[in-house]
Amino acid sequence: MFQTLLVLLALTLCAQQAVAQAVFAHVIVGNNGAYTLANWESDIRLAASKGIDAFVLNIAPPVEGTVADQTALAFQAANSVANGFKLFFSFDYLGSGVPWETGDIVTLLKQYGWDRAYYKYNGKPFVSTFEGPTNSDVGQWATIRQQVPIYFVPDWSSQGPGFEMDLYDGAFSWDMWPKGPNNMTMDVDKSWQGSLQPAKKTYMMGVSPWFYTDLPAYNKAWVWRGDMTWARRWRQVLKVLPEFVEIVTWNDYGESHYVGPIFEPGIPQAENADARSYVLNNPHEAWLETLPYQIAAYKHAFNPSNPAPSVAKGEDKIVYWYRTAPASAGTTRATGNACMSPINTSPQDERCYPIEEIMEDGIFVLALLSSPGWVSVAVGDGPPQRFEGLGAGLNHLSRPFGGEVGNVTVRSSTGVVGEGTAILSAPANGVANFNAWVGCAGHCS
């Protein structure tokens, strides 16, 4: 009997352990105030089907009203779906303008940290933040750890690599968009990783497809280069090989980096802060379509015992995205011109560039092919540009659209055909929209 109990205890502890090579998606719980249990269950099933391991629940204080209600619904959904999908908290120190109180964090972690659906690493509840070191006494985390055992991986990106390293078990970098008229590199990731590895601490790398916001009420008029960033960052993941990857975000509509379904009540809609004009009719869900392959590639590269990614015959697909007007066309609501603040560093470092220097007028493509072949991309009645000699697996392509207008058509040698929304010479209402339209052709869910 005693040996049986030991075996059961060991199995229980193993079930509580999580392994590295995990991929998470950042969820702004504040945007889910009108969610039902069915909404949460649907999102969890969708995310799990694409290879995502957990939702990162971004919550700001106070924990009452819809935040408390939606947190409870999220855990109820994760447990009811029962597909192994997990949740964990990211305590947002900037979302409400007030810092988190130590007691409130402890209460939440005691309430949910040992829930079956809470993500654990090394047998401890996994905890992250959005900033925090300059908004409150970072020593509060030492106090929290005395009351609740946690595996702490905060985002303290504003402080740079190595800050207060004794307080955390790993670090998450929010620096995942390029600065100015440049492509995103992995230099910052390597710097963080280099500071963490000697101390045997883990690194969580951020991957995001886009960043555009035009909300005058919040004095937010920012656009950073998206273009091929989604494809480029997943390739960089294979070189950095972080222990964890966090997708930013599932549902931040105001900043245009959502990859989940559009939930209209969650879009900022206050006076002078209405993002519906650049979110509605700009779906991003197709960005999820290549994730199973990209996540499998990451987990295989990190640990070759994981299955290598492959594309079965009949599962070919083309994911493609673009803006629907040239970068130089139209004016922004926030500034009245085509120049927005594109630097994701401190305000004193901000510099304004012409939009056309930041963003390429191009069509960007991820093609999953089951056999070698070609893909073509055409705009309107213009001649298609054909990309020959592509290999089986994931291919990265892009082509400019210049002055071309009309619907975008994609084809592949493996029989995929799709048509996307039209590119116009200028926005119909004269107001610029630097969000992306994302489509999928072929074997898409």
Image: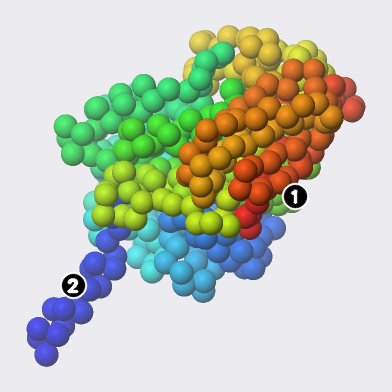
Q: How many marks?
A: 2
73 to 249, vertically: above or below: below
Amino acid found under the numbered disc labelled 1: Glu
Q: Nearer the viewer, residue 155 or 3?
A: 3
Q: Nearer the viewer, residue 45 or 296?
A: 296
Q: Residue at x 64, y 63 (%)?
A: 39
Give the residue pinned by disc 1. Answer: 264
User: Regarding mark 2 in the picture, which secondary structure is present there?
Assistant: helix
Where residue 191 sits, quadrant-wise, is top left
Give the residue pinned by disc 2. Answer: 10
Q: Residue at x 51, y 11 (%)?
A: 349
438 to 364, vertically: above or below: below
Mark 2 and mark 1 residues within 8 Å of each other at the beta carbon? no
Residue 11 coordinates in the image, percent (x, y): 22, 73
Q: Nearer the viewer, residue 374 or 393?
A: 374
| Position of the N terminus by quadrant | bottom left
First reached walking from the N terminus: tag 2 or tag 1: 2
